[in-house]
Amino acid sequence: MAAGVDISAHYSRGTLLQRLQAALAADGVDRPTIETLAPYDHFHGRGFAATQELAERLAPRESDHILDIGSGIGGPARYVAARYGCRVSGIDLTPEFCEVARILTRALALAARVDFHEGDALSMPFSDASFDRAYSMNVAMNIADKARFYREIRRVLKPGALLALSEIAQGAGGAPDFPTPWAKTAATSFLATPEETRRHLEAAGFVVLSVRDTAQEALDFAKMSRAMVDRGEQPPHRAVRLIHGDAAAEMAANTGRGLAEGRLVPVEFLCRTPE
Ligand SMILES: C[S@@+](CC[C@H](N)C(=O)[O-])C[C@H]1O[C@@H](n2cnc3c(N)ncnc32)[C@H](O)[C@@H]1O
């Protein structure tokens, strides 16, 4: 699948583990934990803070098996499993991310409850009605076939299951500038408006419980990060820099401008499948 190859290539340079180890050593971290990895392994706007908020809305129970769609290097999956005591399975298109996710999960002694599958969210290697709840953080922007994406998620969820989504939506102000953290060019960026996403979710059979625009939280987080950098401190969210290296500054500037001009709107959906 050509687009899939382009998307994986955008995220992968083959040296992620070494770069992460170097970043942790520079931070003075000798033992990775949920907290010491958090600046690096939550690869979405507002990082760890956004994961904690989304997880609270999903409210996993200890007996749940949770699906993380587009699990990246696994920070959200490890956090959810550690905080709520449940089982989490992640699936991601990028082989290097799955490999690093497994290494970090073993290092945190969570491998008995957290596993990662390399694969495409449009055709997942899971049986119908396998999962109690699911979430996906900043993945839909890479998915052209939204109808199929939400139908496939619905397929693997049990009746009455919750789904929490975060994504960057298309705002009214026009297309974003590229590169962004999720795409080098418009060829692999597929933004939907919040209304379009709601329609796709409902067409797939989900009941949409809430839609939350988090643009103000994103702008406040960016302001706080800039203030920390101005004081000579490290910003709280360093995943884009870890993954994309020198290109990260331009990506962050393009995203910040897109947010400020209403071209990009971070949005969260909470939905459930019918009983
Ligand atoms: C911005 S990252 C977010 C990673 C993770 N959700 C997080 O928040 O830390 C987007 C992720 O989506 C994955 N992805 C993109 N398209 C996908 C697809 N069709 N199937 C599975 N994963 C996909 C990428 O490989 C990448 O890991």
Image: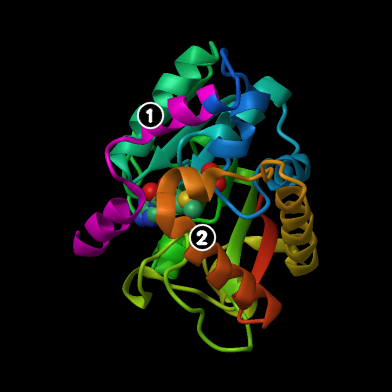
Identity of the amino acid at label 1? Leu
Which residue has dot 2 on it? 249
Say which residue appears at 45% left-offset and 27% top-offset: 22
- Residue 180: x, y in percent? 47, 66
Q: Residue at x 68, y 60 (%)?
A: 269
Is the CB–ligand 1 distance for label 2 below 8 Å? no
Picture quadrant where residue 144 is located = bottom left
Whether residue 256 is in magenta: the answer is no
Pointer 2: residues within 10 angstroms few (<14), some, or many (20+)? some
Could you tell me which quadrant the N terminus lies in? Answer: bottom left
**In the image, residue 14 lies in the stretch drawn in magenta:** yes
Q: Nearer the viewer, residue 93 or 178?
A: 178
Query: What distance separates the C-alpha of mark 1 from that of mark 2?
Result: 21 Å
Task: Name the foreground residue: 47 vs 134.
Answer: 47
Q: Mark 1 points at which residue?
A: 17
Check if mark 1's residue and mark 2's residue have beta carbons within 8 Å.
no
Question: Based on the displayed image, in which of its 4 quarters is residue 98 positioned?
Answer: top left
Residue 22 shows in the view: yes
Q: Does residue 258 lie above or below 113 as drawn?
A: below
Q: Which secondary structure is most common in the magenta stretch?
A: helix
Give the residues in magenta.
Answer: 1-25
